[in-house]
Image: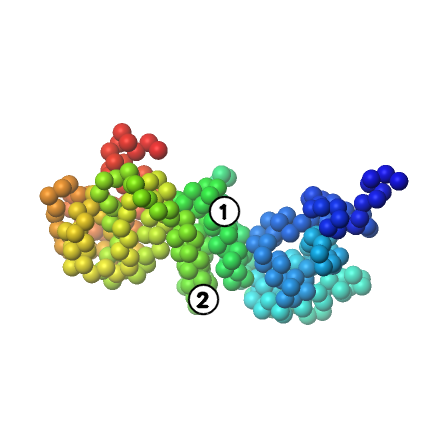
Amino acid sequence: MTKSEQETPSGSTDSGPPGDGETDESDEPTLPVAAVARRLGIAPSTLRTWDRRYGVGPSGHTTGSHRRYAPSDIARLELMQRALLKGAAPAEAADYARRVSAETAAGRTQPEHPAEPAAAADQDGDWLSDIADQSRSQGSPDPRGLGRAALAMDDESMQVMIAEAIEGYGVAATWDSMIRPVLSAVSNRWVHAGDCVELEHLVDECVLAAMIRATPLVPAPRNTRPILLCCAPGERHSLPLYVLRAALARRGLGTRMLGAALPSASLAAAVRRTAPAAVALWAQVAANGGADVIDQIPRTRQHMRIFACGPGWFDTDMPGRVEHLDDLAGAVDRIESVVLGEADSTR
């Protein structure tokens, strides 16, 4: 008997970890957890949770063996994912997926009771289409997987996707091409339908956590004086500042994060204490981006640049010492070049 004839069924621990595309005893091709997770756009740990809690794992999996998913198993997972995107709870989505799979196997290809009304499916489809319409060209991260994870309120998958995109494409590209389209779609959904506030909060928290993790410590910064990052008084949209800090830190630039809605007097005190090389002041809303805010920033003996960042400054007449920066990638490049000087900003 040859070695191939002696092999145990796919996934057995006796044969070691099998490779992608192996077949089981019925010659049905199977995939490992990582491959299925990539296909569905979710985290591998989410698949294991679905298996453990809801019983939608690989049908041929036994204790002690590697999980390997057959096409029928993957189809069941796709049914569960679609039900989740339509608003079903995980347990309901799993029950729906198992029932429809059983009906399909019995020869009935259409489910008797859809998981959610068709109108909800249309709304989610429009929402995802809106995200796709805002996606950038090839060579940048695709926002649709993040959108699906947001609809399913799968925070773990969102954070994994964001982290992988940052490592693959950088902070600025991840923000512009993946995160902003999703946040914009959530905002549009709220404006037109009055819902999805919970999704906006969840996405914000996931992005914030991912950006904090992506921000390295800079014990020996390239800039001798720090860059202050803060929001204008009354401005609570601080998330872009954390993105900016992560991007600057990954270039070896030291910053001081002062966060949301910093009073003018507190900003003035921070400027006097630190003598920063630059101040990046964020305003999302026009009501918060006024020239009076700039006027209250004290001048220092050492030269200091002020950058008015965000759309809230569009209608503000800027003094000569202030530069308006709207695009995040451009802001990172510009702040680096000004703080270090053109000759040292080529990293």
Question: Could you say where residue 113 lies in the image, as x and y percent from the top left?
Answer: 68, 70
Q: Quadrant of residue 87?
A: bottom right
The image quadrant where one finds the N terminus is top right
Question: Could you say where residue 154 lies in the image, as x and y percent from the top left?
Answer: 53, 60
Question: Could you say where residue 172 lies in the image, as x and y percent from the top left?
Answer: 39, 44
At a point 29% along the width and 41% down the height, the residue shown is 221
Residue highlighted by disc 2: 198
Residue highlighted by disc 1: 164
- Residue 115 versus residue 26: which sits nearer the camera? 26
Looking at the image, can residue 83 be seen? yes
Looking at the image, can residue 287 be seen? no
At a point 16% along the width and 52% down the height, the residue shown is 273
In the image, taking residue 64 as reference, residue 233 lies left or right, namely left
Q: Nearer the viewer, mark 2 or mark 1?
A: 1
At a point 80% along the width and 63% down the height, the residue shown is 106
In the image, taking residue 55 as reference, residue 182 lies left or right, namely left
The image quadrant where one finds the C terminus is top left
- Residue 226 versus residue 118: which sits nearer the camera? 226
Is 91 rendered above or below residue 65? below
Residue at the far right in the pictured view: 1
Residue at the far front in the pictured view: 14
